[in-house]
């Protein structure tokens, strides 16, 4: 979604996914398109929360990033949980403007960015790694 659309996007469930030979990003969750500027929070601000992604196999050593999350600076994306992930990519995780992003039982094989790149993100956790 993007700014200006409003509404709530919640309770998204993605399970049992196999990703192969991706070149850019294996998983991307974004509210930032083009060069849209931050706005005041209003009814036209989308609220993205409660996303669960589980049982993912990603074999894409050429992918720039395994996971790229870009919430909105004025309304960060909330409560995103990844569970049982086995992935390969050039870089692992980039997370901007998000709250409570949790990776459980996740194995990442990366060449460049080993540590998660976190910008204006709170509540980021690694569990059982």
Image (tube, helix red, strand yellow):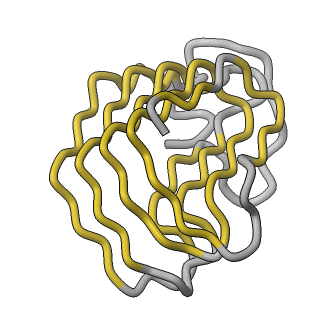
Q: What residue is at 21 percent from the left and 60 percent from the top? A: 17
Depicted 57 relative to depicted 84: above or below: below
In this view, which residue lies farthest toward the left?
16
Q: Please name whichever residue, 24 or 6, is drawn nearer the observer in this view of the structure.
A: 24
Depicted 89 relative to depicted 27: above or below: below
Q: What residue is at 60 percent from the left and 54 percent from the top? A: 68
Q: What residue is at 54 percent from the left and 55 percent from the top? A: 67
Depicted 62 relative to depicted 45: above or below: below
Q: Is residue 95 left or right of residue 25?
A: right
| Residue 73 falls in image quadrant | top right
In this view, which residue lies farthest toward the front?
128
Depicted 21 relative to depicted 7: above or below: below
Q: What residue is at 43 percent from the left and 64 percent from the top? A: 87
Q: Is residue 86 left or right of residue 122?
A: left
In the rendered image, residue 66, in percent from the top left (x then y), is placed at: 53, 63
Q: Is residue 100 left or right of residue 57?
A: right
Numbered disc total: 0
In the rendered image, residue 117, in percent from the top left (x then y), is placed at: 77, 48
Q: Please name whichever residue, 87 or 119, is drawn nearer the observer in this view of the structure.
A: 87
Q: Is residue 129 left or right of residue 65?
A: left
């Amino acid at each position: 979604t993007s700014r200006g659309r409003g509404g709530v996007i919640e309770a998204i469930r993605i399970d049992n996914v196999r990703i192969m030979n991706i070149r850019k990003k294996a998983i991307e969750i974004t509210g930032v398109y083009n060069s849209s500027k931050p706005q005041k929070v209003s009814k036209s601000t989308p609220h993205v929360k409660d996303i669960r992604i589980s049982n993912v196999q990603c074999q894409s050593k050429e992918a720039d990033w395994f996971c790229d999350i870009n919430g909105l600076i004025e309304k960060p994306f909330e409560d995103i949980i990844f569970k049982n992930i086995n992935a390969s990519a050039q870089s692992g995780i980039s997370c901007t403007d998000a709250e409570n992003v949790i990776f459980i039982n996740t194995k990442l094989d990366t060449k460049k960015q080993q540590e998660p790149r976190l910008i204006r993100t709170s509540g980021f956790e690694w569990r059982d790694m």
